[in-house]
Image (spheres, rainbow, N blue to C red):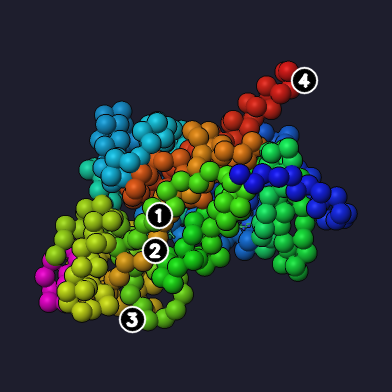
Amino acid sequence: MNQTDNMKNVSNSKGNNLQADVVIVGTGVGGCFSALNLSEDLSIIMITKSDLESSDSFLAQGGICVLHDDDDYDSYFEDTMRAGHYENRKESVDIMIRGSQDVIHDLIGYGVDFAKEDGKLLYTREGAHSRPRILFHEDITGKEITSKLLAQIKTRKNIQIMEYTTMTDILISQGACAGIEAETSDYKKIYIHADQTIFASGGIGGRYQHSTNFPHLTGDALDISKKHGIRLEHLDYVQIHPTTLYSKKPGRRFLISESVRGEGALLYDKNGNRFVDELLPRDVVTKAIQEQMKKDGTDHVWLSLEKIPKEIILSHFPNIYQHCLEEGYDATKEWIPVVPAQHYFMGGIWVDSDSHTSMPNLYAVGETSCNGVHGKNRLASNSLLESLVFAKRAARKIMSEKQMNKATA
Ligand SMILES: Cc1cc2nc3c(=O)[nH]c(=O)nc-3n(C[C@H](O)[C@H](O)[C@H](O)COP(=O)(O)OP(=O)(O)OC[C@H]3O[C@@H](n4cnc5c(N)ncnc54)[C@H](O)[C@@H]3O)c2cc1C
């Protein structure tokens, strides 16, 4: 453990000190939902390393899971556990599933527009789900949710947002987190003092050559946590997504959502033969593709959307269709080349069921945290939901502790 006070640095740097009740690192769904669930009489500073739209939350395509109805509980629980190789923390899975309808209700209240038919919510299915229980907005569900949350954030007078500001360390006082140290785009060091700090800084894809993530997501909070002896968990649990569009160009890999396979797309080897059940969990499909590519001596396999009616491709997957077209493939007429790439991090900063880390006054939510909900492998469309459910719990815990402190003061 190396939790020595580092507040002395701060007193040397007048002028660069900010004060807030809560500082939140990250403006994806985890950060935004934490902020929105905190009381409006708390002062909140949110920082993001890039611009507001550059978070993985904006990239989510397939959708967000929800408990379809009470009869779905056992099946949803089992699907999540099976995908996670039964290494999931059962308590977290239960909390996520039971909290799902409430979170969806909140999102709809913020104006999130999920697909509907005859006025009723439409549910789609993805790999390893035994029934349709995923809400979606075309194939840009993450953008729809996150932009609506950000719109709410901007109406809150108690929340200040700082773009292009990078957390470089935390402040520690008497063994507890006391805020963060950060660097602005003009290389100015700032110190944000706060009673409570929330890490919502996303995944680690920026560390990989081939990833679907934004390159600036480099697991900074993990490095800082390691430096200060904050507990980490399952750092080797990294999810490789089976189907990203094959490209020779450098940069972020474009995801071909699992829901495309959920709607009937098939995988073929170089000779046009199927080699795997497309709806198996991600890690199993990834392994089968990697083995097939090795056997065939190819850089990719093929994905065929020919079993999906053209109107479904154009209405449910317009963004994927358009992107493939720009890369030279008309997905309504021809197969598209796909290859696995790094996609999601199941491990992270260990947190309890209220998203509290092992350091006092420090919380972690979303992909940077590990509450054990995903076990060894995440079930498709569980991560937006998990981020939201546990962000709300972090906010609630902060509020209840504040109340308790007030009562005992
Ligand atoms: C292509 C793609 C498709 C996906 N599709 C789905 C899907 O259909 N359904 C689903 O449930 N999940 C999906 N996911 C996963 C899901 O989008 C993410 O797990 C989730 O959005 C993570 O949210 P977050 O708030 O934890 O992090 P993010 O949304 O990634 O936000 C991280 C934030 O932290 C900031 N940050 C990072 N480091 C620092 C630092 N040092 N200082 C300051 N700020 C920092 C970033 O700038 C950013 O604002 C998908 C992911 C990708 C990449």
Q: Where is residue 341 in the image (x, y as percent from the top left)?
A: 36, 66
* Residue named by callout 4: 409
For the residue pair 99 and 264, the one nearer the viewer reads as: 99
Dot 2 amino acid type = Gln
Residue density around tag 3, few if under 14, some if 14–19, many if 20 or more, within 10 Å: few
- In this rendering, the answer to whether 102 lies above or below 162 is above
SS for callout 2:
strand
How far apart, in angstroms, are the residues tagged by discs 4 and 2?
A: 49 Å
Q: Identify the disc placed on residue 11.
A: none
From the image, state whether disc 4 or disc 3 is nearer to you.
4
Q: Give the range drawn in magenta.
A: 262-274
From the image, state whether disc 4 or disc 1 is nearer to you.
1
Dot 4 amino acid type = Ala
The disc, 4 or 3, on the residue closer to the chain's N-terminal end is 3
* Residue named by callout 3: 328
- In this rendering, the answer to whether 360 lies above or below 401 is below
Residue drawn where x is 72% and y is 54% of the image: 181
* Residue named by callout 2: 342
From the image, state whether disc 2 or disc 1 is nearer to you.
1
SS for callout 1:
loop
The disc, 4 or 1, on the residue closer to the chain's N-terminal end is 1
Residue 169: quarter of image = bottom right
Q: Contact (CB < 8 A) between labels 2 and 1? A: no
Dot 3 amino acid type = Gly
Residue farthest to the top, as pictured? 408
Q: Position of residue 48 (x, y in %)?
A: 63, 57
The disc, 3 or 1, on the residue closer to the chain's N-terminal end is 1
Dot 1 amino acid type = Asp
Q: Contact (CB < 8 A) between labels 3 and 2? A: no
**252 falls in the magenta region:** no
Q: Identify the disc placed on residue 236.
A: 1
